[in-house]
Amino acid sequence: MPPPIQLPPVQLTPIGIARTPHPDRVSAPRQPYAAQGTPGTIELFPGNHYEHALCDLEGWERIWVVFLFHLNPPGVFRPKVLPPRSAGQRRGVFATRSPHRPNPIGLSVLRLQAVDGLVLHVLDLDLVDGTPVLDIKPYVPWADAFPSSRTGWLAPLAPLAPTAALADDPRNATDLTSSSAAPPSLLHPASLDPEPGFHVTWAPLAAEQAAWLQREHGVGLVTPVDRALSLGPQPHPYRRIKRDGDAFRLAVKDWRIRFRVEGRQVTVERLQSGYRPAQLATSTEPAIVLQAAFVAHFPG
């Protein structure tokens, strides 16, 4: 038996940070194609000759961005995780794209719009604002895409009720590539997704509540709720979905969203506070005061 190999410690230094409209993990999409069109920047640190390292990058349409899951609790490693599409079954973390890894390294493919000095203007950002960036590489379609590859356990899930045909999924009716004649191997990833998404609609009361929160207090719940429920409304601890009597309840930060499911249709019925009445009546914390104002405006 060969002697064990002694490996030196690995030290990585971020080359820059991502600036995105996603302030936290709740608001960040889980995949770049779910963040379609979301703009942002990758800002590289000065004083390292990175402006020379960026030469010739602007001609590429997409780039790989290697980053750190910097919000992971230090030293926490989950060998088995519960991905959203796993139908309640835990999977080995190396067979998933979960952020809870031995080394918290992530990988995203983003659309590159422009290079301006040390700033890269990008689209389809699924990163939390302030994410440390470790490396940048060009995306080479003929070398990096293998759409006919096997996908292991990641296959169409058993639906909650009979599903509409895959062709009815609006994601599969739109070619989001730059060429209308692109072959299947170059289609947008959403068109190759084997599982049709859930269609989320908002009942009048829920829509009115969401509009009031956005208008009066700048609280945007529609996008994170739509993203969470379109991926799958089944009860799931990581996405904080539970049964609520004859319906379901999603927790988004301190808010509770009640919804119903019929086939692939999800209807958001109403928004509710996540605080107890006693807290709403006595607390002076700004977040709780806001929710008290919400409950007063929408009693019941």
Image (cartoon, grey):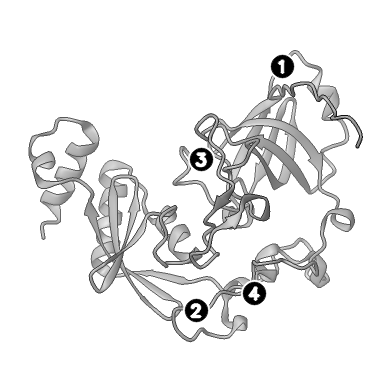
Q: According to the image, label 1 marks what residue?
A: 46
**Residues under numbered marks 4 and 2 in contact, where contact means CB atoms less than 8 Å apart:** no
Q: What is the three-letter code of the residue carrying label 3?
A: Pro
Nearer mark to the viewer, of 4 and 2: 2
Reading the chain from its start, which is encountered first: label 1 or label 4? 1
Reading the chain from its start, which is encountered first: label 3 or label 4? 3
Q: Secondary structure at mark 3?
A: loop
Q: According to the image, label 4 marks what residue?
A: 172
Q: CA distance from mark 1 to mark 4?
A: 42 Å
Give the number of the disc on residue 21: 3
Q: Is residue 187 above or below residue 69?
A: below
**Residues under numbered marks 1 and 2 in contact, where contact means CB atoms less than 8 Å apart:** no
Nearer mark to the viewer, of 1 and 2: 2
Nearer mark to the viewer, of 2 and 3: 2
Instruction: Point out the residue furthest to the front here.
Output: 1
Q: Which residue is rendered at x = 20% and y = 44% of the image? A: 291
Q: CA distance from mark 4 to mark 2?
A: 18 Å
Instruction: Point out the residue furthest to the top here.
Output: 47
Q: Is residue 176 above or below residue 224?
A: below
Reading the chain from its start, which is encountered first: label 2 or label 3? 3
Q: Which residue is rendered at x = 74% and y = 39% of the image? A: 114
The answer to which of 99 and 4 lies nearer the viewer is 4
**Rendering coords of residue 103 (x, y %):** 65, 35
- Where, by quadrant of the figure, is residue 217 drawn? top left
Give the number of the disc on residue 184: none
Q: According to the image, label 2 marks what residue?
A: 159
**Rendering coords of residue 151 (x, y %):** 72, 66
Reading the chain from its start, which is encountered first: label 1 or label 2? 1
Q: Which residue is rendered at x = 75% and y = 43% of the image? A: 64
